[in-house]
Amino acid sequence: MLALALCALSACHDNDPVLEPEQTEEDITEVFSQEEPNYASVSINAPVFVSSSIKAEVRDGLQTFLTNITSLEDAEVAVVKEEDIGSYEGKLVELFQRGGFIIVAQPDGTHFRDFAARYGFPNAIPFDASQEVLLYATSNKREQYVLYATNPFNTDEIEDPVILSMLEKNAESYYKRRIFELCRWLKEQRQSQADTRSDITYVSQFDPKVLITKCDRIEQDFSIPMKHVVADRKTSSADWLDMTGSVKVVYTVYSAYVFDGGRQPGDYYIVKMDITVRNGSSYTKFKKKHGLITHWGAGYFMKEFDLSSALIDPSMFVVNPSDDRETAQEKYNKLQDIAYYMASSGNVHKDLIVPGIYTFKAPSPGTTIGATTYTSGFDVGLDGSLSVGTESMAGLAFSASYSSSESRTISDVSIKVDTEAESEAVKNSYIVKEIGSFKLPDGHDENDVEALIPLVARSDFNATSTWCWKVPVGEAVSDGSDAGFQIATRFDYQYASYVHSSDDMFYPDGYHKSFSHLGYSYMPLPHASREPFGVIALKNNETLAIYDINIWAQDEHAGEGDPLVIMDSGYEPGEEALCALPVGIYYLEFSMKYKQPDDPTHMVISRWKMGNVKVKSNSDQDKATTRISSADFELIDVN
C-alpha cells in the first residue's frame, strides 16, 4: 500500500499567457449558459457527517445530494477538511473499517498522507494540490475518486455589487456541477452498479477453463478552467472567453496472474480505456461589438486530445513506519521531482518503469486515418495455473481467455497510437480534421462561424482503446508477492477558437489563440492474487451420494467453527468434487444419507472425515491436483 502522494497529481499549464481583461456582466452571464444537470438523479439517502469548517459553497453543494445529516458515529459518509483529520481520527478509522466512505475536502496531502500511512488506507492525495483538488473520496474497498476543480472567479478587484452577487450565484452552481459527478460515483459504489469484482476467498466449484469477465474500475474526473483572449484589439478591450473544459477517464481492468513455473508466468492486465471529453461544456458561440466593428466567433473547440496511459512502479519511494523523518522527506522530495518531470515531459521517469513490462497485446484500434468507424477489442488466451482476482482469490484455472469487440463512429477524427519503447506507455491521440480559413458570405452571423467547426469538436467526444500489459515474474512480480503498481494518466488538451471580423483587412478569419493544457494523475491498480493455489479432487467411491462437503485449514481447530469452503452440491457414485484452494494442509468432512433397510421410516446420516490433505501448486493441471477417495475417510458419527 502506498503511503505517498504519487497517486493523483494534476499539473496544468497554458502555452499562452492568460490575460485578465475587464469582466462585464455579459461575459459573466455566458459562463453558465449551459443547462444544469438533473441533480435529483443522484440524491443519496446515506447518513452523512459534514464538518462545519468546510467552506460554504462546497458544503452547500454536497448537501444538495447528501441530505441525511447525522453525527460522525452514525455516518456512512464523512466529509472532513484536511486539517481536521486529527480531531476525528479514531471515529474516521471506525467508519472506514465498517465500510464507509471518507471524503477529504480541499486536501494538500500532508495530514491525510500521514493518517493513511498509519492505518493502511488507500492514498491518492497529490502534493500541494489545494488549488487543484476539491474533494478526494476513498473507502476500504479501495475504490477512490479524485475531484479536480478550481473556483474560476477572481473577485478581488470587482466592486460592482450586482456583478459580485452574480458571481456568487454562479460559483454555487459551479460547485454543484462538479460535486454532482463525485456523488454520482458515490451512488454507484453504494448500489454496486459499477462492474467491480466481488471478494471471493476460495473457489468451491472449480472450473479448469474460465472466461475472464470480472473487472476493476478506476475512474478519474478532471476539470480545467480555460480563460483566454480569442481576438485582441488595439483600440478597445480584447475578446475573451472564460469556460471550463473537463474529461472523464475510466479504466476497466481485467487482471490475471500465471504462477511461477507456468508457461507464461507473470501479471497480465487487460485494460479497456474509455474517455469522455466534455467539449460541450467548454464551447460557446459569441458576437462581440467594437463600435462599428463586429466579431462573430466560436470557442473553445477541440483540435486534438492526447491521452497516455502507463503502468508504473513507485515501490522504492514507499514511506515505511520505520523510516525516520529525514528518510521520509527525501522520498517525498524525490517523488515530487519525478511527478513534475512526468507531467511536463509526458514520459515515464526511468525510476518508475516496471522491470520487464511489455505490451502482450497491442492497442486496439491502432492508428486510424480517414475512417468513419473503428473497432476496439481483441482476444487474449492464457495457459498454466493462474488466478483471476484482485484483493483475494476470484478464480483458478489452467486456461483462461478474454474476448471483446466494440465499434465506434469517429467522423472527422483521426486516431494515432504510439507505444513508448522503454515504459510501454500507450498514447492515444485523437486529431480533429482541420477546418481551414475562408471568407464567409455577406449577411453572416455567429451561426455561420459555428457551421465551419466539426460537430465532434464542439460536443462531447467519446473514445475507447484496449490493450494488454504483461509483467513477467522477476524483480517486481513473484508468487506470494503483494507488490502493486499504479496506472498513470497523462492528458493533453489542444483547443482553439475561430473568429470572423467585419474588419477583414486587419482581422482576417482564422484560429485565434490556440492553446494546450497538460495534466498527470496516478491511481493504484489492483493486481490478481499471487497466492499459489492447487486443486482437491474428492472422488465418490461409495454406493450412495455424498454431500455437505466442508473444508477447514488443518490446525488445532480443524472441524470447528465456520469452514473455509462449503460445497452444497451432491455428488453421485463415481463423480468428483473439485475445489481450488491455496497451497497448504486441509481437513475435510462430508455426509451420506440413506434409509435403514429394516426400518424405512428411519433416515441414517453418517459423517466422515479426513485430515492432512496436502494441496500443491503446479502449472500442469494433473500435477496440481490432489486426488483423494471417499473410501479413505474415517467415520465420525452415525445418526
Image (cartoon, helix red, strand yellow):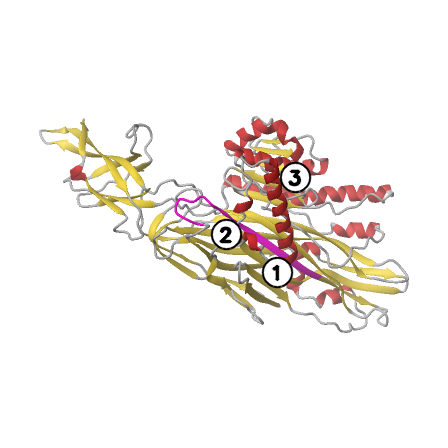
Dot 3 falls on a residue whose secondary structure is loop
Magenta residues, start to end: 477-495
* Viewer-side label of 2, 3: 3
Among numbered discs 2 and 1, the one appearing first in the sequence: 2
Give how far apart the Cα atoms at labels 2 and 1 are: 19 Å
x and y percentages locating residue 219 in the rendered image? 56, 48
> Taking 204 as reference, is 287 left or right?
right
Instruction: Give the class, few, some or many, for how many residues have Cα within 10 Å of label 2's Cα (few <14, many ≥20).
Output: many
Query: What residue do we see at 50% from left, 59% from top?
Result: 466
In-front residue for pair 50/361: 361
| Residues under numbered marks 2 and 1 in contact, where contact means CB atoms less than 8 Å apart | no
The three-letter code of the residue at mark 1 reads: Asp
Badge 3 is on which residue? 107
Give how far apart the Cα atoms at labels 2 and 3 are: 27 Å
Badge 1 is on which residue? 306
> Taking 583 as reference, is 494 left or right?
right
Query: What residue do we see at 56% from left, 43% from top?
Result: 144
In-front residue for pair 175/105: 105
Give how far apart the Cα atoms at labels 1 and 3 are: 28 Å
The three-letter code of the residue at mark 3 reads: Pro
* Viewer-side label of 2, 1: 1
Badge 2 is on which residue? 252
Assess whether residue 484 is covered by the magenta stretch: yes
x and y percentages locating residue 635 in the rendered image? 17, 31
Query: What residue do we see at 8% from left, 29% from top?
Result: 598
x and y percentages locating residue 620 in the rendered image? 29, 53
The image shows residue 597, relative to residue 41, as above or below, that is above
The three-letter code of the residue at mark 2 reads: Thr
Dot 2 falls on a residue whose secondary structure is strand
Q: Is residue 53 visible?
A: yes
